[in-house]
Image (tube, rainbow, N blue to C red):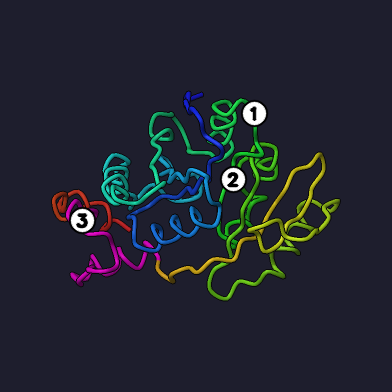
Amino acid sequence: MIPLRYTQCTGIAIIGGTFNPVHIGHLRLALEVSEALAGVRTELVPCAVPPHKEKKGVLPFKLRHAMLRASIENLPNIFVNDLEGKRAGPSFTYDTLAAYNEALHGKKENIFFCLGLGDFMLLNTWHKGLELPDLAQLVIIPRGREKLEDFAHTVRSFWPESKECPGETPFTKTCLLRDGKKVHALSLPRLELSSSFIRSRWRSGRNLAFLMPDQALRLLYQHKDIVMRHWNSE
């Protein structure tokens, strides 16, 4: 277990991902989460070894982490955590949330794990995915054409004993599981942009201005040989 240490922290919102590479959609989402969950520290957590993706085509962790760090330098209340890069083996979300629980002395009500509705609908395929509410409040964020009806249906399918209750501010919907565990839906503006789109344009030699933070884009060009070697292998 990788130790984390926090002092005077009232809560943490966690946004995980491969960030291969980070783009403005990631950062805009982090800002939206930070403002919606006012007073909560927001952390971007890049995975080291994606358990649900082929490692081929994924940039080295140090480069992805460096691009994230450079991108959030001037963003208030947004941080990057490299704990998954310090751990051997696949970057399982369950293990990551367990580390946060230990750091916050088991106060899972102060930990918010944010993920898209599409990923949430596949939670039963994750390592101990249906046990994640034991470690954090799940915050599900629909995107594009995804509907809140799919959120409620998915919660019922995973946890049949769940009960829908009025959305707790600022959440759109809240579902109560056993033992006080909670799963929320949070409607936020989201930019329709993906890392795969960025990689495709990079391979085609297209201009990535305004799709990525300038700081991250500079690092891509500084490490062009490494980037081409990985992204051309997809």
Question: Which quadrant does the C terminus fall into?
Answer: bottom left
Q: Earlier in the sequence, mark 1 or mark 3?
A: 1
The label number, if any, that marks residue 106 in the structure image: 1
**Does the magenta portion include 234?**
no
State the separation of the CA atoms marked 1 and 3.
43 Å
Crowding around mark 2 (Cα neighbors within 10 Å: few <14, some 14 to 19, many 20+) is: many
From which residue to which does the magenta span run?
A: 194-220
Residue at 57%, 57% (x, y): give it.
119
Question: With 24 as the anchor, is 36 left or right in this view?
Answer: right
Viewer-proximal residue among 96 and 37 = 37
Residue at 78%, 57% (x, y): give it.
157
Please state which of the two labelled residues, at mark 2 or mark 3, is closer to the viewer: 2
The vertical placement of 114 against 190, above or below, is: above
State the separation of the CA atoms marked 2 and 3.
36 Å
Residue at 32%, 48% (x, y): give it.
68
State the separation of the CA atoms marked 1 and 2.
13 Å
Name the residue carrying label 2. 112
Q: Earlier in the sequence, mark 1 or mark 2?
A: 1
The vertical placement of 7 against 185, above or below, is: above
| Quarter location, residue 94 | top right
**Does the magenta portion include 195?**
yes
The vertical placement of 127 against 189, above or below, is: above
The label number, if any, that marks residue 228 in the structure image: 3
Q: Earlier in the sequence, mark 2 or mark 3?
A: 2
Q: Are marks 1 and 2 in contact (CB under 8 Å)?
A: no
Residue 51 at x, y = what percent?
50, 44
Residue 147 at x, y = what percent?
65, 72
**SS label for mark 1:** loop
Mark 1: amino acid: Gly
Mark 3: amino acid: Met
**SS label for mark 2:** strand
Residue at 32%, 55% (x, y): give it.
21
